[in-house]
Amino acid sequence: MVERFEITTEVISIGDVVAQLADPANGAIVTFIGVVRGETDGREVRYLEYEAYPEMAEEQLCQIGKEIRVRWPSIRQVAIVHRVGRLEVGETAVVIALSAAHRSEMFDALHYAIDRLKEIVPIWKKEVWADGEKWVNALETH
Amino acid sequence: MEKMEINVRVKFFAAARESLGTGEIGLTIPTGSTVSDLLNLLTEKYPPLRAYSRFVSVAVNRAYVGMQTELRDGDEVACLPPVGGG
């Protein structure tokens, strides 16, 4: 059974993450792909700088995988890969992929994975604009 | 005989790391110190950290802990600002 929980400085290949889940028992794979948006609250973003506490972040990603298996035993495989460092607008910041025999409940599990990632995984991002920069405070934003 | 002091490593991230100018410092603190004691000591010693300490969560050896957790010699303590990946 493939599991992948990784913090990387490299470009994420969405195809590779999905291909790793290939298994004849799978009937469906769902993915969430988080990409760098070019504006926040009407302000143009030049690029984002992501930082992680990588050792702990990978353990927390693994924890999310465990939680999903407990809540949704039908989910067969979980892969979560998050990129850190400087990311340009349009680049992939995170890929979450889940596989199962049947599609039921997969979207709930995917939603849960994204919410938990934003809640417990030690990753931070800095927005860099043409005229300044700011570490995004999750407590201040929606 | 029990040692009177312990050594811990403290890690900082994001805005706190930038304002401090380093991502990690080593500290010698009294045996029996809690996470809360350590944070108080840090903000006394490094005033720029005061702006961040209210919102920080703490992990010891890569697991989230409460403020009253007692620290041990060799612990890796991470001061984690509110996270925001994705």
Image (cartoon, coloured by chain):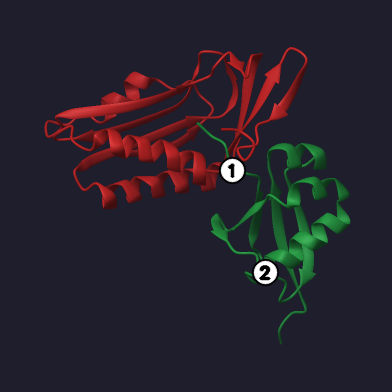
Chain colours: A red, B green
Residue A67, numbered circle? none
> Looking at the picture, which amino acid does disc 1 mark?
Tyr
Chain letter belonging to callout 2: B
Q: Which residue is mark 2?
A: B73
Q: Is residue B45 above or below residue B83?
A: below
- Identity of the residue furthest to the bottom in this view: B1
> Looking at the picture, which amino acid does disc 2 mark?
Asp
Image quadrant where one finds the C terminus of chain A: top right
Q: Is residue B42 above or below residue A2?
A: below
Disc tally is 2
Relative to B29, A139 lies left or right: left
Relative to B82, A95 lies left or right: left
- Identity of the residue furthest to the left in this view: A24
Q: Nearer the viewer, mark 2 or mark 1?
A: 1
Q: Is residue A82 visible?
A: yes
Q: Residue at x 26, y 39 (%)?
A: A77
Crowd around label 1: few <14 · some 14–19 · many ≥20 (10 Å): some
Q: Is residue A1 visible?
A: no
Relative to B63, B4 lies left or right: right
Estimate the x, y position of residue A19 in percent, counting from the top left. Answer: 27, 24
Estimate the x, y position of residue B68 in percent, counting from the top left. Answer: 65, 70
Q: Which residue is mark 1?
A: A53
Q: Residue at x 50, y 46 (%)?
A: A120
Relative to A72, B57 lies left or right: right
